[in-house]
Image (cartoon, grey):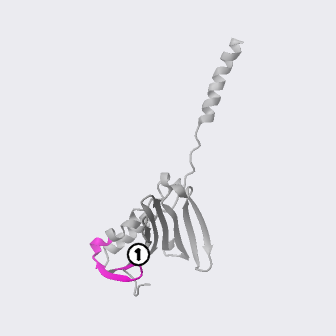
Amino acid sequence: MKKLVFGLLPALVILLFSCKTKKKPEDKHFISVVSLFEKQVAHVDTSLYSITRYTVRDSLHTDTDYIPREKFREAAREFLELPDLSNPEIAGRFKEESRYDSLIRRVVIAYTPLDPKKEEIKKIELLVSPDIMEDSSNKVTSIIIDKVVNNRDGFLEKKMLWRTGKSFLVVTTTQQPGKPEETSSTRVVWNEEEPL
């Protein structure tokens, strides 16, 4: 009996260790949205565009001011601080879906969290032109981001839109306990004729 137990012991140990081997998470190759924003900011930093900011608070009051090129990075900070989906640790928390939208004639690549309750970023959508550019790539025409922070201090929602080579818009809705909801929007334009 002892020989049988000692003979089975190594086999049992090997079996236990082989079952404990973790599966390596799948290697996701998501688009680095942050690097797209970095390229845009670098382009504006070296351009001669006139950069205008329009700020609207609760649809009643509009402020217009001009941003010096040196301050553009600071104005675009919210976009530059988004999680980088090309980082494998962050990519493991998101899933990617793509589809062609015939109404807007764009390919839509959407990144959504696997566990929405744990992530502030609820969705990142890239709208990609199906037209092939000179360098054999497709152009990302717009990037849409939904961000929600909901905690005991209140509710914060940001709807963000970046129009490649033209402008960006951030609509912020906040509500603190016992206070009415407030909405503001900031639109920064550097290569458009008229604001929307």
**Furthest residue toward front:** 178
In the image, 113: left or right of 41?
right
- Element at label 1: strand
Q: Is residue 30 magenta?
A: no
Q: Residue at x 53, y 56 (%)?
A: 117
In the image, 107: left or right of 62?
right
44 over 110 or under it: above or below: below
- Our reading of the magenta stretch's main secondary structure is strand
In the image, 167: left or right of 96?
left
Residue 181: x %, y % from top left: 44, 71
188 over 85 or under it: above or below: below
Q: Residue at x 50, y 57 (%)?
A: 119
Q: Residue at x 56, y 48 (%)?
A: 25
Q: Is residue 121 visible?
A: yes
Please provide the residue range marked out in magenta: 53-72
Q: Residue at x 56, y 67 (%)?
A: 109
Q: Is residue 57 magenta?
A: yes
